[in-house]
Amino acid sequence: MSILSQIGYSGVRASQIALTATGQNIANVNTPGFSRLAPEQHALGGQTPTGIGGGVQVTSIRRLASDFQNQQLWRATTEKQYYGTTQQYLGALEGLVDSEGSSISVGLDNFYAALSEASSTPESIALRQQILGEAKQLAQRFNGLNGNIGIQLEALEGQRVSMVEEINGLASNIADLNQQILEMESSGRDTATLHDYRDNLVKDLSQFVGIRVQSAADGSLTVALANGQPLVAGSTAGTLKVGENLAGEQQLSLVFAKTSFPLVQEGLGGSLGGLYDMEYGALRPAQADLHDMAGALAQRVNDTLATGYDLDGNPGQPLFSYDASSTSALLTVNDLSTRELAFSAQAPGLDANGQPVPVVGDNQVLLALLETKAAKINVAGELVPLNDAYAGLVGRVASASRQNQADLAATTVVAEQAQAQRDSVSAVNLDEEAVNLMAYQQAYQANMKVIGTSNELFNAVLAMF
């Protein structure tokens, strides 16, 4: 009879553990990254050849998690965050260059329209004033657009610094958890919660950079960047640092185990890689195109004016000033009066009092200025007219934005699928847990009945004596 009681007691104990595991699952149904628990039960054998068994034993509580699906989720998260980050800047850049209020094409059209209107009466003060006004508006468009791109670059650099701090914190926490898991597992303590916490940190890390993760036999994780450089190994974490090169641009270095080496940002993946690709694949090239256009415009207009004479017979003076080192004053209009615009190819004559008399209708320089609109300039290595150069910039940015939006949509779907696949194994299903709860409860009650029956039989035997 003692064997029957022993079997019943083992069943009660197993049911209690199973009920506890189910309660833990239900309690954490809304806990991000929680991996549900499942008791592993094994039957106990009998002690004699005629024994029918010794009951049941819970050998372990299994944490239901798939390394493969976690890896898939981390990779999908990296891709999604890369395109999400780049879209923020691409969308903003597209809105800037394609806006009518800041469009260089609109400013060029207005400036050359004013020149064309004055070509019939080049000595008109009112039309000359209009030309100066449109020139200032055009310069303002260049400066405004260049300044806004500069603001985006400053924001990007600030975001990079913040991301590096986040990455360093996550790497340090993962290394600390590696050490805690190693110590607790060596003493036989439960580490399921720590594993979940660590996996959550790895997922958070995968948002910022592409990573390679390997599990060690001692339970620790080794995390490396996509290019193979180590970030976490056991209880040691690397540290990213942001510095500046000679050009004043940000550069990254990685310090690991007291050794520092430069970090190549190209191909990093994730949000940090997206920042690099936006800086050197969109923002700085767009800014360089603006510099090419502003410099070429200033040179061609100024060179043309230098061949003429103003209303007072003075040689032509430059209209524009181009400053490559300035963000807010990339292109400025020099302080010229309307009379100082050298639109005439001939020096004016003098009247009886020795005062200059402009040659009425002399618009040869003005016509030459109109021809500069179609003249080809070197922008991004291509010879194109000014308007076409800006249209090309707008087209490249719009095309990149559309492609990036499509890639973002695709990677979002992939990330959602990866999350669903992970959840199908690890996440808590309340319907399933409700069934388990009833099953374990019934098993508990049935085993209690076995114990009660064993006691009744034992008492009946005692009553026979």
Image (cartoon, rainbow, N blue to C red):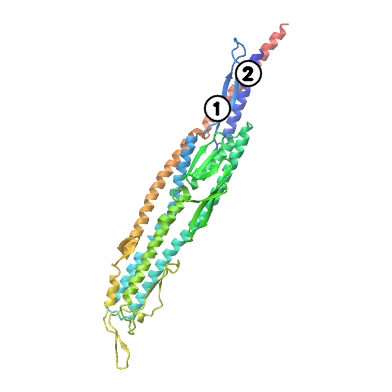
Q: Nearer the viewer, residue 335 or 256?
A: 256
Residue 304 shown left or right of residue 210 in the figure: left
Q: Nearer the viewer, mark 1 or mark 2?
A: 2
Q: Pinpoint residue 436: horizontal percent, then vertical percent.
A: 55, 27
Q: The residue under label 2 is which amino acid type?
A: Gly
Which residue position holds label 1? Answer: 436
Q: Write the residue at 62% across / 36% down.
A: 183
Q: Is residue 189 visible?
A: no
Number of residues whose C-alpha sits closer than 10 Å to that of mark 2, classed few (under 14), some (14–19) or many (20 or more)? many
> From the viewer's perspective, is residue 149 above or below residue 48?
below
- Residue closest to the far front: 259
Disc 1 and disc 2: Cα gap in Å?
A: 20 Å
Q: The residue under label 1 is which amino acid type?
A: Asn
Q: Is residue 221 visible?
A: yes
Give the secondary structure at mark 2.
helix
Q: Write the residue at 39% across / 47% down.
A: 407
Quadrant of image for the C terminus: top right
Number of residues whose C-alpha sits closer than 10 Å to that of mark 1, classed few (under 14), some (14–19) or many (20 or more)? some
Q: Pinpoint residue 382: horizontal percent, then vertical percent.
A: 32, 60
Q: Quadrant of residue 40?
A: top right
Which residue position holds label 2? Answer: 8
Residue 122 shown left or right of residue 17 in the figure: left
